[in-house]
Amino acid sequence: LPISGVPAGALGPLTISTSAMAGRMAMPGMSGMPGHSVLLVSNLNPDAITPQGLFILFGVYGDVHRVKILFNKKENALVQMADATQAQLAMSHLNGQRLHGRVLRVTLSKHHIGRAHV
């Protein structure tokens, strides 16, 4: 699967189901819960990962609203999907996959990605 911004072979053998490509898969009890649409992605390679690369990778599973690589822990990032169903879909397909030589951990985050208040 070629992904712009992600070197060939960085993901190893990654297969994507037809339903994942469509970005829509029913997860019982998960739809319509925007509060659970933020994923914590950990064990990233801070020397190789970019917000754009994560945006493209997670975008395979739905609409990505925001990506933030944590400032003090560059091996962690928050990825906000459009809804909980898309977040669950991305988590189920990407958790445990290799990216830039590291095994990704993708979990639901208790954090929200908000904009700064003025």
Image (cartoon, rainbow, N blue to C red):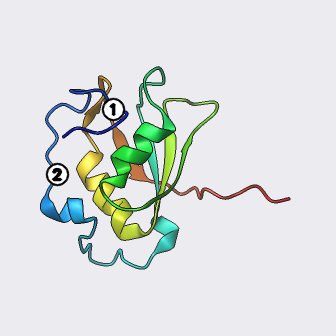
Residue 73 sits in which quadrant? Answer: top right
Residue identified by numbered label 2 = 16
Residue at (37% x, 33% y) in the render: 5
Residue at (28% x, 46% y) in the render: 94
Residue identified by numbered label 1 = 6
Q: Amino acid at mark 1?
A: Val
Secondary structure of the residue carrying tag 1 is: loop
- Closer to us: 28 or 51: 51
- Locate residue 33, reporting x and y percent: 45, 75
**For mark 1, does the 10 Å Cα neighbourhood hold few (<14), some (14 to 19), or many (20 or more) residues?**
some
Quadrant where the image shows the N terminus: top left
Q: Amino acid at mark 2?
A: Ile
Residue 45 sits in which quadrant? Answer: top left
> Horizontal placement of 96 versus 118: left or right?
left
Secondary structure of the residue carrying tag 2 is: loop
- Locate residue 95, reporting x and y percent: 29, 45
N-term mark: 1 or 2: 1
> Horizontal placement of 91 versus 72: left or right?
left
**For mark 2, does the 10 Å Cα neighbourhood hold few (<14), some (14 to 19), or many (20 or more) residues?**
few
Quadrant where the image shows the C terminus: bottom right
Outermost residue toward the right? 118
Residue at (47% x, 40% y) in the render: 52
Q: Nearer the viewer, mark 1 or mark 2?
A: 1
Residue 88 sits in which quadrant? Answer: bottom left
Residue at (36% x, 53% y) in the render: 59
Q: Is residue 10 above or below residue 106?
A: above
- Closer to us: 105 or 81: 81
- Spatial CA span between label 1 and label 2: 16 Å
Q: Is residue 10 above or below residue 112?
A: above
- Locate residue 65, reporting x and y percent: 51, 59
